[in-house]
Amino acid sequence: MEHFAIFIVLGIVIVATIIAAIFEEKRCGAMRELAQRLHLGFFRGKQRGIVRKYSYINKFHYGRNKYAKNSLFGKYRDHEVNVFDYHYTTGHGKNTRHHRLSFFLLELPAVFPELTIVPEGVFSKIGQALGYDDIDFESHEFSRKFCVRSKDKKFAYDVCNAKMIDYLLSNTGLSIEIENNVLAIYFNRRLAPENIEQNLNHLIEIRSLIPDYLFNRR
């Protein structure tokens, strides 16, 4: 009976592995087709160099076994972009947890201080309790729905202008980070391939709402 139970468990593991492989192959194919349609390059394999290149991005500070894969890269609407699945692990042994995200990066023509704009939630409230205060704005709705942090408050206010606030209030699921010469948006899950283009356009729209004078004086 014990041996039979072991065979059942092994069978379940094998079936789950096969299903996961089929799903990954299907996702890879869909991402490749999207890259071709958008005239972007595509690289399927694991890329640890992306994590090293943009190591200052907050999300890249966590965990281990960090890599990007299914990367779409090149020029999109006159901006250099890189879109990819991102993976890292936390915990050890039986408690190992795999985290899978979707990342969108756009290179900026100037260097900026760190600014994060993320939906208000449990973790942001914990940060406030530990002394990491967010920046308040005249729009109480925006301050209620988003946690904004930067050591340079003037820069935060310049970026979060009236048009940017209106845009983000219409797209409350976006998490944004600006640092060095990169604008990033990310999601704490892997987006379906059919949702990639829409959020790539969100990335471009957010870039367009950053005032030109911020680039001219850098």
Image (cartoon, helix red, strand yellow):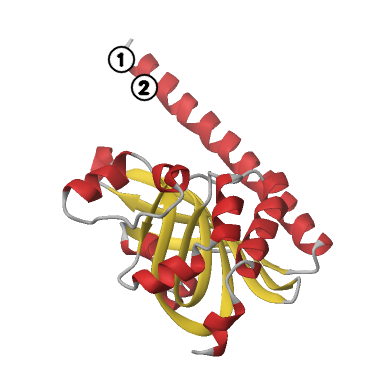
Residue 47 visible in the picture = no
Measured Cα–Cα span from mark 2 to mark 1? 6 Å
Farthest residue to the top: give it: 1
Q: Which residue: 46% across, 49% down?
A: 139
Rendering coords of residue 119 (x, y %): 44, 46
Q: Position of residue 40 (x, y in %)?
A: 75, 69
Left or right placement of residue 160 versus residue 193 in this view:
left
Which percent across, then down, holds residue 71? 62, 64
Amino acid type shown at disc 1: Glu
Q: Residue 138, image x and y in percent?
A: 43, 53
Outermost residue, front side: 138
**184 vs 74, nearest the viewer:** 184
Q: Are marks 2 and 1 in contact (CB under 8 Å)?
A: yes
The N terminus, quarter of image: top left
Specify whether residue 198 is in view: yes
Residue behind mark 2: 6
Q: Which residue is mark 1?
A: 2
Residue 133 position by quadrant = bottom left
Q: Which residue is rendered at x = 59% and y = 71% of the image? A: 106
Q: Secondary structure at mark 2?
A: helix
Q: From the viewer's perspective, is residue 84 above or below residue 9?
A: below
* Residue sitting at the far bottom: 217
Residue 16 to residue 205: above or below: above
- Relative depth, front residue between 116 and 45: 116
Q: Residues within 10 Å of mark 1 (few under 14, many from 20)?
A: few
The disc label shown at residue 50, or none: none
Q: Is residue 95 above or below residue 58?
A: above
Q: What is the residue that sits farthest to the left in this orientation? A: 130
Q: Amino acid at mark 2?
A: Ile
Crowd class of label 2 (few under 14; some 14 to 19; many from 20; radius 10 Å): few
Give the residue displayed 80% in from the left and 63% down from the top: 38
